Image (cartoon, rainbow, N blue to C red):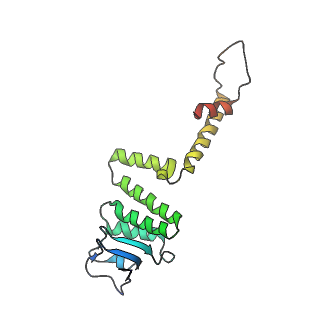
Amino acid sequence: TQDLDLRPAGRPGGRVRLAQAHVGSFTDSALLWEAVDGIDLDGFDYQKLNNTHVIDTRQRLAWLERVMPDFAPGPYEQLAAAYRRGGEEERSEQVLMARQRRRYAESNLLGRIWGALQRWTVGYGYRPWLAVCWLIFFAALGGVWFAAHPPPPVDEGQNPVFNPWLFAADTLLP
């Protein structure tokens, strides 16, 4: 259908089945997501969300978590794509990062550790500037360390001026 407006007057009493539906524009409300038996989103495809400025991204993500007892990437990818098509890149990245957080949260211990490492170092690849922050932090930490603990000179006959900050940067960067 071209337009699907699902803003019920009350909480739906059963399961709302949107599986395999293809919609041009989709409008929803909080009451829809409180359906008694949940919502079936398997393969639900929509091109545009009509009320993106009314409903916060965090609220939409909470709705997805509520209706999906187990992780499935499809609804997250669909929501991110709808935001991207609407020109809302930041919201799209928020959804994709939430997808990764949930994916790793439902993984085994090693997967959860790997997910936490990715989250804090590069934001699952959606925040590459975090890697630059870590490089600056470790370069400064190395500079402080080498200022207090300079390495012994390689050639005793030559004593160039030692700079702990350049040495730390040289040691850190390839």
Q: Is residue 164 above or below residue 95?
A: above
User: As drawn, is 143 to the left or to the right of 17?
Assistant: right
In the rendered image, residue 134, in percent from the top left (x then y), is placed at 57, 44
Q: Residue lying at the far top in this picture: please name it.
A: 157
Q: Is residue 19 above or below residue 150?
A: below
User: As drawn, is 89 to the left or to the right of 46?
Assistant: right
Quadrant holding the N terminus? bottom left
Residue at 50% of width from left, 54% of height from top?
126
Quadrant holding the C terminus? top right
Q: How many marks?
A: 0
Residue at 40% of width from left, 68% of height from top?
62
Considering depth in this image, is 52 or 117 the residue closer to the camera?
A: 52
Q: Is residue 5 above or below residue 96?
A: below
In the rendered image, residue 69, in percent from the top left (x then y), is placed at 30, 64
Residue 65: image quadrant is: bottom left
Residue 22: image quadrant is: bottom left
Q: Residue lying at the far bottom in this picture: please name it.
A: 9
In the rendered image, residue 5, in percent from the top left (x then y), is placed at 39, 82
